[in-house]
Image (cartoon, rainbow, N blue to C red):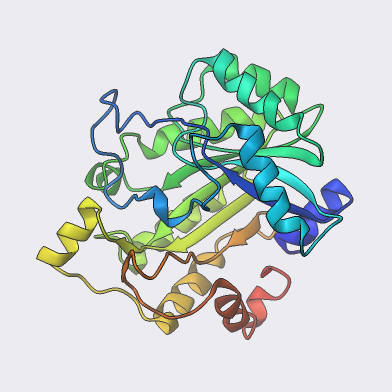
Amino acid sequence: MTYGEWLKEQLGCKVQKISLNAGFNCPNRDGRVGRGGCTYCNNQTFNPEYCATTKSVTEQLEEGKRFFARKYPDMKYLAYFQAYTNTYADVGHCIALYEEALRVPDVVGLVIATRPDCMPEALLTYLSELNHRTFLIVEYGVESANDETLVRINRGHTWQQSVEAIRRTADLGIRVGAHVILGLPGEEHDELMRQARMVGELPLTTLKLHQLQIIRGTRMAREYEENPWHMPTVEEYIQLVRDYVAYIPCNILLERFVSSSPKELLIAPSWGLKNYEFANLLRRYPEFDGRVQ
């Protein structure tokens, strides 16, 4: 079953995620655990134009709805709290933003992206209650299972914190997603297979994979320009994904395999493929049957 089919089965209708920038920060930006944020991160690469902190959550959702409704007038929506760390604020403030999103007509659930070190018990208790009255996914940015890599990219949390946050959340019956980046500096094939085995043992509902992208204006871009390392070709990345997915149980839904950044921001790898074109390449392989959107 693909992620889209699963969503339709869960909600009884076709749904689209609408990305939001609700004005959150990150603890590796404001000094709590670090400064400067993740070395690879530039939020411009995935925020649509309507995502702006000058607009309320309601305004962003209504603008996103108008964009999608032109093509799919009967669509329902998930409010996707995507930019930065969407549980990193006063618990009351977080709850107010989530509840505001759920009051918008045709919004049938939430996806909340956050870090494994930013889930206070009081907020998790609220999310457990919320999970009984609406569709909910909590998506943790894991990125790597290697603590040395996590330090190198300035994540500010450990693999064990990821494991604990995912298990705490899943134990309450909340659907849990994880996000990992394949190809971070120093992580070769054997290390990524070790990671895949560890990720496959977690109580996940969904998993997002994507290739490392070198983005202009980031610290990693400066590192890459000073001392370039090998970036995989499309064929090499497909083989890597095939090997990785072999360790991921079929009950974990693979939400994505690749990410695309604006050409003007992307330094490498420059494959020239849209996400659906990459998905078509994956469909050639029987092990991806039913797991690709």
- Please state which of residues 254 and 44 is positioned toward the viewer in this rendering: 44
- Total residue callouts: 0
- Quick one: quadrant of the N terminus? bottom right
Residue at screen point 72% across, 49% down: 65
Q: What is the quadrant of residue 166 in the picture? A: top right
Image location (x, y in percent) of residue 73:
84, 57
Q: Is residue 21 left or right of residue 151?
A: right
Residue 205 showing in the rendered view: no
Image location (x, y in percent) of residue 91:
55, 15
Q: Is residue 129 left or right of residue 34?
A: right
Residue at screen point 43% across, 64% down: 261
Image location (x, y in percent) of residue 140:
51, 40
Image location (x, y in percent) of residue 214:
30, 63
- Please state which of residues 147 and 7 is positioned toward the viewer in this rendering: 7
- Please state which of residues 133 and 243 is positioned toward the viewer in this rendering: 133
Residue at screen point 67% across, 81% down: 286
Q: What is the quadrant of residue 14 in the picture? A: bottom right
- Quick one: quadrant of the C terminus? bottom right
Please, is residue 202 above or below residue 87 in the view?
Answer: below
Residue 113 showing in the rendered view: yes
- Please state which of residues 140 and 202 is positioned toward the viewer in this rendering: 140
